[in-house]
Amino acid sequence: MAAPIILMFPLLLILTSREQWYPQFFVFARIWAKIVLYGSGLIPMVSREQRPDRNRSYMFVANHTSMSDIMLMLHCVKNPFVFVGKKELTKIPVFGFFYKRTCILVDRNSQKSRKEVFDRAQARLQKGTSICIFPEGGVPDDESVVLDEFKDGAFRLAIDHQISVLPLVFLDSKKRFSYTFFSGGPGVMRARVLKEVSTSGLTQDHKKEFKKEIRDIILRLLEDDLVQKQK
């Protein structure tokens, strides 16, 4: 992760100094992600039910089991988006420096932080940038859990701004590179980009049902994949 960031450091430092330059930074972030994935022997294979409209904002969501999910999301999506992510990742050397400058950080133990995250995400959406949130809110503590319960934030924002939620499913991230030390190894990482789910006409009264609808879509594909592997 560190090597390409160090090589591109001066340019990345300039592009992260102003918010209006974020789309240009995003191009280099995608290059970085590809270098990390392929350089680590992780070969992304992406199937798409839909290609996002480059002129629209979306709420991108996916299941979360691995740090490689960040790189895989960048590989899959060309629309400039901003991650909403946990504050703890700023501690990673080199990567953490740019993560802090470009992402919307949340301290999950602070109610004030969660409110500030919502305000910052709203500001970015109003400027036409998409948002990416892993709605489980972190990696499940129980590794036997296929998909943890979803938090409200992504769906609240999507409904407020009447933008579609576009789900992605990462099928091999945990197997290839989980948070367990020295786990996984090189190989194919399958990802599926699904069809967008519209929020048109929805209000916050529909949030619970809408959140469940998105979770059920992702969970069904994960469970189907587990069944296929057991055959």
Image (spheres, grey):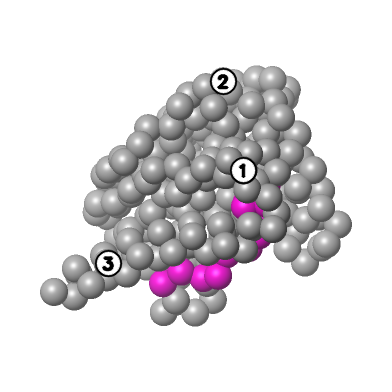
Residue 36 visible in rendering: no
Number of the label disc, if any, that sits on residue 24: 2
Residue 172 visible in rendering: yes
- Give percent across and percent down for residue 57: 57, 32
Residue shown at the point (40%, 65%) measured from the top left: 219
Q: How many marks?
A: 3
Q: Nearer the viewer, residue 167 or 142?
A: 167
Name, please, the residue furthest toward the front. Answer: 201
Q: Which residue is label 1 attached to?
A: 201
Do residues under tags 3 and 2 come within 8 Å of each other at their CB atoms? no
Q: Nearer the viewer, residue 225 or 17?
A: 225
Amino acid type assigned to the residue bearing label 2 in the image: Gln
Up the image or down, 205 lies above or below 54; here it is below
Do residues under tags 2 and 1 come within 8 Å of each other at their CB atoms? no
Magenta span = 146-157
Question: Label 3, label 2: how many angstroms apart (C-alpha)?
Answer: 38 Å
Do residues under tags 3 and 1 come within 8 Å of each other at their CB atoms? no
Label 3 neighbour load within 10 Å: few <14, some 14-19, many 20+ = few
Q: Which residue is label 3 attached to?
A: 224
Label 1 neighbour load within 10 Å: few <14, some 14-19, many 20+ = few
* Earlier sequence position, callout 3 versus callout 1: 1
- Give percent across and percent down for residue 115: 81, 53
Q: Nearer the viewer, mark 3 or mark 1?
A: 1
Q: Nearer the viewer, residue 221 or 164?
A: 164
Amino acid type assigned to the residue bearing label 3 in the image: Asp
Q: Nearer the viewer, mark 3 or mark 2?
A: 3
Residue shown at the point (35%, 65%) measured from the top left: 220
Is 230 left, or right, of 212 in this rendering? left
Disc 2 element: helix
Question: Label 2, label 1: how many angstroms apart (C-alpha)?
Answer: 33 Å
